[in-house]
Amino acid sequence: MILFLGGFIPIQAQDSVLVKSIFIQGLKKTRRITVLREMTLQEGTLIPVSQIPQLMEVNRNNVYNTRLFTDVEFSYVTENGDLFLIILLRERWYIGVLPYLNFEERTFREWWADKDFDRLAVGGRLQWRNISGYGDRLDFHLQEGYTRVLQVNYFYPFLFRKAKIDLGILYTYTANKEIGYVTDSAILQLARLPGKKIRFTQSGMIDFTKRFSPRNRLSFGIGYQYFHPNDTVFELNPYYLSGKTELAYYPIFRLGYSLDQRDWKAFPLKGYRVTLQVRKAGVLHLFSTHHFTQVSVYFSKYHALTSRWNFSWGIAHLNTIGRNIPFFDKHFIGLNGYFLRGYETYVIDATWFQTLHAEIKYGLIPRQIVTFNGLPLQKKFNKFLTDIPIAVYVSLFSDHGYAEDHSIGATDTYLKERWLRSIGVGLQLLTIYDNYFRFEYSINHFGKTGFAFNWRLPLR
């Protein structure tokens, strides 16, 4: 893939050029404004000559990070102080209807230990991207079996075009056959009722996001959560809902800020990301059974040492203010995407924790987009299968964490108020449509070792 093609500048002494015009080729479903809103380069922009290569790379990455295109190429020419920018795009396949088949365990290793086929969940998922050409997307998920789920998630990026405000809507309904109700020695204890569901939940959220630039955003969300556990749960853990009620319902107010300067979101090798969030649960006793505030801070940094070597590190800090906290709404290491490598078999519930992740990796196949020809079905799906991102890296990593729990009814102190640490090696893969996988072998401070498989980036 060509990241960008250098142009020529006839007047060598010239310090800046004017972006005279932007030509975009390859748009079929996507609208021109959807591409332009991701760019800092606009027609009429005056840019220093010395910054042209950097600006081309940044803007090319901005467009690619929309995940609307399999390939993005920037080229330009300059003439008489004017710059003419040409953007070549190849659109992705935007509609996917996929069957859902999953054994509902936290990790595959846990399911393999029991091989419990009753944990099977079946259903379907509709993923529809770029519905109107403006980059909007719809995710619809329906499943039955071990857990009944209905989830609808819609994002529209042009709610107020001039103000650059986007809209997000999320609704989720779940009926659980089994839930975790407490931890014991950092092992999640599960409760199940024969022939009936043990908990029903509903939640909804509306988000508004202000875009100051393609990489700089402020968001505000308002929502509501409702939880109805079976009475059996309270017999097992009287403090499951902090000991004051048999139902949990409260509004949620969320304020977040994100500055994302990474090059590729799917597999970053350069740049950094800062994320701040404040989440307020409950307002007035009439509408709320619980009141607490959660604050989270994330920072990750990526250093390209050479064309093949990369070093990255990141920190996370989460704190809950208040003690009246339902068990399921605490912070968890081992659930909801927060993992310490080497501690995959544990679940640590906490009101306060911080983690540190660091890794160095080497590219066996450095990250790139490869153009393939002659693949099976390529004649029929040529535009979707021609350009495929590929990366194969081996990594050496070390994770650290510390957790405390000050909630009402907290009894499990195992792995809390002590530094947790692990080291390990891994293999990371990036493939078609930016799908990411990693396979890792680690050892923790107990000296316990194990293999793990994950499809999330180790740094948030």
Image: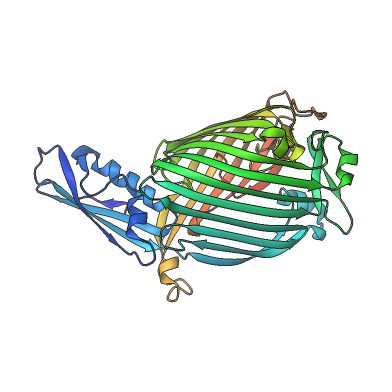
Residue 356 in sight here: no
Q: Is residue 140 left or right of residue 288?
A: left
* Quadrant position of residue 293: top right
Q: Give residue 318's position: percent from left, percent from top.
A: 62, 30
In this rendering, position of residue 318 left or right of residue 187? left
Residue drawn 73% across and 50% down? 201
Q: Is residue 225 left or right of residue 1?
A: right
Height in image: 431 above or below 448? Answer: below
**Residue 232 percent location from the top left of the image:** 89, 45
Q: Residue at x 41, y 71 (%)?
A: 382
Name the outermost residue toward the top. 417
x and y percent of residue 180 in the render?
79, 44
Judge whether residue 70 can be spotted in this image: yes
Q: Quadrant of the N terminus?
A: bottom left
For the residue pair 346 and 249, the one nearer the viewer reads as: 249
Q: Quadrant of the C terminus?
A: top right
Residue at far front of view: 286
Q: Position of residue 193 (x, y in %)?
A: 88, 53
